[in-house]
Image (cartoon, rainbow, N blue to C red):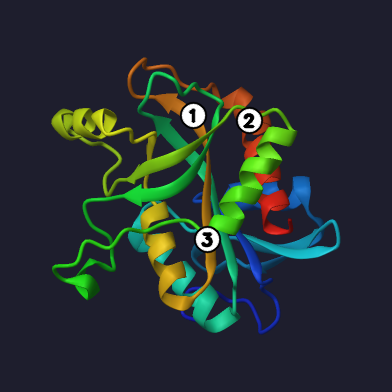
Amino acid sequence: MTVHIGAKAGDIAETVLLPGDPYRAKWVAETFLENAVLVNEVRGMLGFTGSYKGNRVTAHGTGMGMPSLSIYVNELIRDYDAKTLIRIGSAGAMQESIKVRDVVLAMSATTLSTPSEGMFKELNFAPTADFTLLAAAHKAAQSKNIPTHVGSIYSSNTFYDERPDLNEQMQRHGIMAVEMEAAELYTLAARYGCRALGVMTISDHLLTGEALPSDQREQSFGDMVEIALEAAFA
């Protein structure tokens, strides 16, 4: 057990899917995993461990934003020996070519700052995905004919952003989408020698204002989860 995770030794699998919403972790466990059991509910942050095609998998919530994710990922790696960590979540599209319901695979994650910023001081560290996971996820998406985009994303520290000038520059430089966690996940994975990837479903569009209705989210998010699971065990 840790300060934030009540799981016992051996309860957490080496492969962990990381949705921000703890109830999405519950949905993943009920929908995609066999014999899933609740292994954590401290502070309402649910975690479940089950199996996918014979492979042990944990689905564990991280909360919103990089500070919250940093707490859980640090403990999952240091105290529970997690080796492969895949963020599954929603993102907002920043390019016209990307549509609502598309999947984005984050090759790299740009950010203004992360909880790890103080460690690097003047260094601008470039957080990137694990290539084997990235390649496997892209292959899985292609095999399922799921519209998928690979490239750079932006991990924001704020949900209600009021920097249109910054958004314009990111769009100009090809940033595909915005979310709030991947940059810190990639940084921690690099620090501890683990594999990490961000697989995100486009739920809304910053340019068009289009948003995915809540009653249509599960099917679109299901594509994302299947890609993540297939990539983890390719």
Q: Earlier in the sequence, mark 2 or mark 1?
A: 1
Q: Which residue is mark 1?
A: 203
CA distance for labels 1 and 3: 22 Å
How many tags in the picture? 3
In this picture, is 108 found above or below 149?
below
Mark 3 or 2: the one toward you: 3
> SS for tag 3?
strand
Instruction: Locate the C terminus and report the quarter of the image it occupies.
Output: bottom right
Mark 1 or 3: the one toward you: 3
Q: Earlier in the sequence, mark 1 or mark 3?
A: 3
Instruction: Locate the N terminus and report the quarter of the image it occupies.
Output: bottom right
13 displayed left or right of 177:
right
CA distance for labels 2 and 1: 9 Å
In this picture, is 72 found above or below 148?
below
What residue appears at the point 52 percent right and 44 percent down from the top-left corner? 89
CA distance for labels 3 and 2: 22 Å
Three-letter code for the amino acid on which mark 1 is drawn: Ser
Q: Which mark is residue 220?
A: 2
Q: Which residue is mark 3?
A: 196
How far across and how far down the image is residue 133, in percent?
A: 60, 55
Three-letter code for the amino acid on which mark 2 is drawn: Ser
What residue appears at the point 67 percent right and 37 percent down from the top-left corner? 141
